[in-house]
Image (cartoon, grey):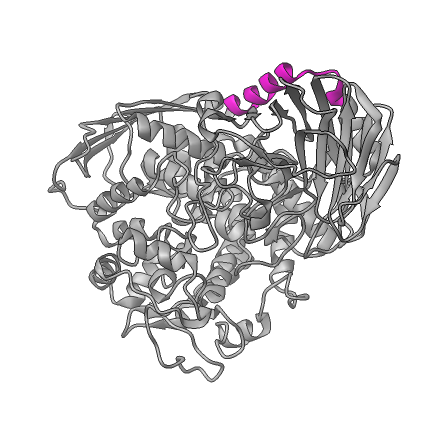
Amino acid sequence: MKIDQIDIRQGTANSPQRSHGNCLPYSGVPFGMNYFAVQTNGANGAWFFQPDTPRFEGIRLTHQPSPWIGDYCHLLLMGVQWQDATKRPDFVGNYRPNEATFNAHHLAIYDDHFNVQTDLAPSTYGAIARYDFQQLELAHHGLMLQFSDHVTFEFTPTGVKLSVSDYHGGEDPNLTMYVELTISGFDRANSGYYDDQNHWFVTTEGHGHGHALTLLLASDQSLINCHLATSYVDRTQAQLNLKRLQDADLTALENVSAAQWNDYLSRVTIRDHHPELIQTFYTCMYRLFLFPQRFYELDVKNKPIHYDTKSKTIKSGLLYTNNGFWDTSKTVYALFSILAPELLPKFLAGFLTSYNETGFLPRWLAPDERGMMPGNLVDSIIAESAKKGIALELMPRLLAAMRDSDSKPVKNCRYGRQGSADYDRLGYIPADKYPESVNWTQDYAYSDYCIGQVADVLDQTDIANKYWQLSKRYLNLLDPQTGFLRPKNSDGRFKEPFVPDSWGSDYTEGSAWQNSYSAFHDINGLMTAMGGPKRFDDQLTALCNTRPSYHVGGYQMVIHEMSEMAAVDYGQVAISNQPSFHLPYLFSYTGHREKTQVLVKQLRKLFNASTTGFPGDEDNGSMAGWFIFACLGFYPVCPADAEYVLGIPAFDHVTLHTADHDIQLTTTNNHDHNNFVQTMTLNGHHYDQATISHQQLLNATNIDVRLGLVPASVTNK
């Protein structure tokens, strides 16, 4: 499937109370520094786009990775007409959503208020837009730019140069995006700006500090071509980025952008009799290749440079942003290792840059460390890459960074291990001192395992054994009687009272049901400690079959994850959020692969390519990645082990085009009513294991699966 067949509005019908993805319809190139999205109601804050609303406020240059993180360094562009600038009109348009083009490489909007057709094609650092005014009714027309916070501007003979500073919550409160913009037929005499009191000023330069500003760039042409480029580095770099774009036209840039998308999409070929499922799969692939975004640029010698927000200086090297590793470590980077392994050395080098400049490996970048979510799960991505033989030349430095980042005291709540001293002393994070203690404990234990994995790859056996032993500390929170991981206080006693479906306080975005099984590295050890496979299977079965009940607990209100779990009624399998991603595959550890198969197939029904296409927050490609794995028929329960638990494939035939050969995945008897894998062969040989290693997968040429109506009468292993 090609990128022009994909509508990027999947998962965009949202509110703070209910998420169907919490996605924005991003137009851009894969991993671009900027994205562009239609804005329908900026008054809604981070939820500024609603797919069914005909209101059109313009196209927003955005860096918002999630509505819960928010936007920064953004601006709004729109083609408008006006009669008398001293009497400000209402600069709000109207469009027909069902007639607009929402593609990753091309936005096309007809605004019937201002009678202008807008087309935009994105680049890595900017865009080309065309404004075709098909009926000129008022004295002036041109381009409107709006800013919500700090901005300075200066008109040039062909347009405007801008400095936009709209950033909240990072190391540099004055982080600035430099913008160079040209428009054809620029009419400087009739250009100017409104301040936050709607006073009109005709001037060659101006500023707005801490308040809104609206800029009008008039043109004497009915067909306006606009070239725009941005930079976080400085004005000179922004001019260079524009120069590299200036000679291109809209069609040429659209084709370049499409080619970049199609390069990734073409790495998977599908033949199947479920067209809706194919559409959903490729739409999820589009989302997979959006994040992380570049935070580096190419200087005059095409060498990578970036702005270091900590030292507030320009430095050389790769740097990436807009990624929460608590989410993306579970699916996104595992898929990159299969479909685009050439990306991982660059990403890892960028994460190492973050460490070198802050003293800590990143946890949640937007654009620098936000300190969101538990753990330090970038460790998982590093370990997974090491075990898969990727970027081995970086591993000595990354191992040192992992050990250093995970051993130093926490720094201003953004960096390092929260409660590390207590964790080392007690073997768990105490609930009477720290919130979400169960999740922090599990994630630290998994990070320790990941450190051990990297050390093992580097033949540092003593270090590996040390950290593997430390990775068992999560068991200090296991209550064998209830079968849950429970919070403990500093005195070593379980916190009382215990309500399994109480959310928050001691658990992250869930209850004990969702958050007791995230020892990804030691599922067999957890199962043994709980009493063996039967007890573990009983617990998982109860998780699936109990009511989707919840107590608001520490949140003291219904949060959207609660309502999403309750709405789909899949028991306590809250596939709407990352802690549940691996739960369906845990049945395979108990010897009941048939339960994994039927559950995964049922959960796939919660996804589609529409504006309500996800069961919860999509989060930087992580939920899209879950669906992709669910369709391919395997899943990385423990990415750091470089293996996949087998599930149930969705398509008749899939070809994975790797760098040196094709892998053919064939599924016969693939009917909607067949929920179980009967047989599987690997390169023509019978295969009856519950897992497949990454190397086995990449070495394969043919994997053949046959489905059946009832579970096979063979012993599950």
- Does 595 appear above or below 343? below
Q: Taking 264 as reference, is 709 left or right?
A: left
State the quadrant of the N terminus.
top left
Q: Quadrant of residue 643?
A: top left
Q: Nearer the viewer, residue 339 or 679?
A: 339
Magenta residue span:
244-263
Q: Is residue 285 magenta?
A: no
Residue 506 shows in the view: no
User: At which x and y percent is residue 648?
Assistant: 27, 38
Q: Is residue 319 left or right of residue 695?
A: right
Percent position of residue 417, x then y: 59, 64
Dominant SS type (magenta): helix
Give the percent coordinates (x, y) of residue 647. Answer: 28, 41
x then y, percent, for residue 335: 46, 37
Q: Residue at x 70, y 56 (%)?
A: 359
At 66% from the left and 22% from the top, the residue drawn is 131
Instruction: Say if residue 608 shows up in the picture.
Output: yes
Q: Nearer the viewer, residue 406 or 93?
A: 93
Task: Identify which residue, 681 or 632, lies in the foreground.
Answer: 632
Q: Residue furthest bottom?
A: 491
Q: How many marks?
A: 0
Looking at the image, is 312 positioned above or below residue 78?
Answer: below
Determine whether, in the image, residue 296 is placed left or right of residue 481.
right
- Please tell me which residue lies in front, 377 or 146: 146
**With respect to residue 334, does 172 lie above or below?**
below
Measuring 61% from the left and 39% from the top, which residue is drawn there? 293
On whether residue 250 falls in the magenta region, the answer is: yes
Task: Identify the residue shown where x is 49% and y is 23%.
Answer: 659
